[in-house]
Amino acid sequence: MSISKTLQGALLAASLGAVCAPVVAPIVLPAHAQNEAPANGISIDNFTFNPPTLTVKAGTTVTWTNKDDIPHGVASANNAFARSKAMDTDDSFSFTFTTPGTYQYFCYIHPHMTGTIVVQATTGSNATQ
Amino acid sequence: MSEFNREDGVNRRKVLECMTWVGTGVLWTVAGGVPHALGLIDKAAAQEAHALTFLQISDSHIGFDFKTPYPNAVATLGECVAKVNALPTKPAFMIHTGDISHLSTAAQFDDADKVIGQTKLDVHYVPGEHDFVDQEQKLFLERYGKGTKGAGWYSFDANGVHFIGLVNVHDLKAGGLGNLGAEQLEWLEADVKGRAASTPIVVFAHIPLWTVYPNWGWGTDDGAQALSYLKRFGSVTVLNGHIHQVMQKVEGNVTFHTARSTAFPQPAPGSAPSPGPMKVPAEKLRSMLGIANVTFKQNDQPLAIIDSALEG
């Protein structure tokens, strides 16, 4: 048990290292973003949505978090959901996707930034797609 | 600097060289319709009284309070204003090419107005995407949009020069660049119709109307169409901001120019993972912020743009 605790400590230290790394070596960022993003989270880093495509079950709440030094916003490409307020550094925006489908979105401040949410029907109701 | 007064057009290259190291603002002189740069601010000040000199500032980003190395967007804007007030020749007016605020709040616009107001100059604004963060764009338009069309576009004349303020940060599309839109393009076509081809034209908008670097969104999807309406004019000058660095291009009768930010620098296209604020040592920062002074002279001299940095 004490070994496993030590191992946990080492893993924690390693992940802290990963948190600090982008400051000196931004190239590490995508890997870090994937490691750090919660299961239904999208991290906005270096003017990109990570992951660019997120697949979730219907009813899932998706949370975007802005890790950039510049504000970003989230808007549906075809007004399928209400757009976020502008998110300054470390601000978040959440939306619960209840209807299966593919949702394209973009940053309404920097529209070249785009991403996709794929919402799958919950088990047993595949037909709704 | 005497090369700047030559009439053979060679001087633009010299100007470009100058701009790479001068940098606080762009001092513009309109001279008989052809773009041209003069030199340092004191040189421009020596121009005749009938020259039209105006000033461009851009990207104040009031409300941006990212810690080091940026001291404070209000403070650096104040330093730029002090530089403007110290000019030996008072510019006729100022244009602000957008991103006045960081997040379009009333408090940020108030703070910007307080500092910019110290120039006691008339200011012609166009919005940047940071000024249109609220979906209805009310905060910008109620304050700066009186007498404008659509999302805030307009034109006016000064000393025989036709100025056109365009808005390319509205109705942005997923995956797209800056956008003018059909309504504004129609208005522009009508606005310039019937004007003599000898009328010098100055177009100003936030995002570059030419494609600087699409991967970072640095361009305008329908910018080329706007420029097609201006083809027959002998002198067209396009002034933009957005990219927080000086860049210039001359294409036929059109001179494109971007001004520095008064708040923080951005990296050269493709030189960093993203266009986020550049982290530069504090002692270097002021060489990368600044204003632009422009003079049009009423003779056959080309137009002069002088960028000057806060320092260095």
Image: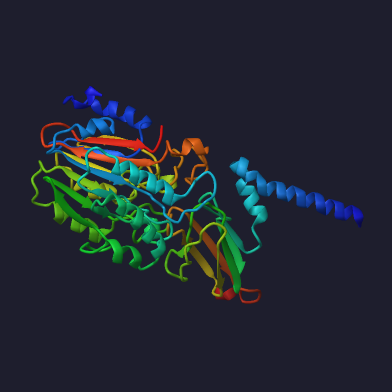
- Rendered location of residue B105, percent (x, y): 41, 63
Question: Residue placed farthest to the top in the image?
Answer: B2
Above or below, B131 relative to B15: below
Residue at 42% from the left image edge and 67% from the top image edge: A78
Horizontal side, residue B46 vs residue B61: left or right: left
The foreground one among B271 and B64 is B64
Horizontal side, residue B27 vs residue B267: left or right: left
Q: Please tell me in which quadrant of the rendered image residue B150 appears.
A: bottom left
The foreground one among A31 and A24 is A24
* Quadrant of the snapshot with the C terminus of chain A: bottom right
The foreground one among A56 and A5 is A5
Res. B109 visible in picture: yes
Residue at 35% from the left image edge and 57% from the top image edge: B114
- Rendered location of residue B43, percent (x, y): 24, 30
Horizontal side, residue B175 vs residue B94: left or right: right
Q: Please tell me in which quadrant of the rendered image residue B134 appears.
A: bottom left
- Rendered location of residue B258, percent (x, y): 33, 41
Tally the numbered discs: 0
- Rendered location of residue A46, percent (x, y): 53, 49
Q: How is the image coloured?
A: rainbow
* Quadrant of the snapshot with the N terminus of chain A: bottom right
Res. B258 visible in picture: no
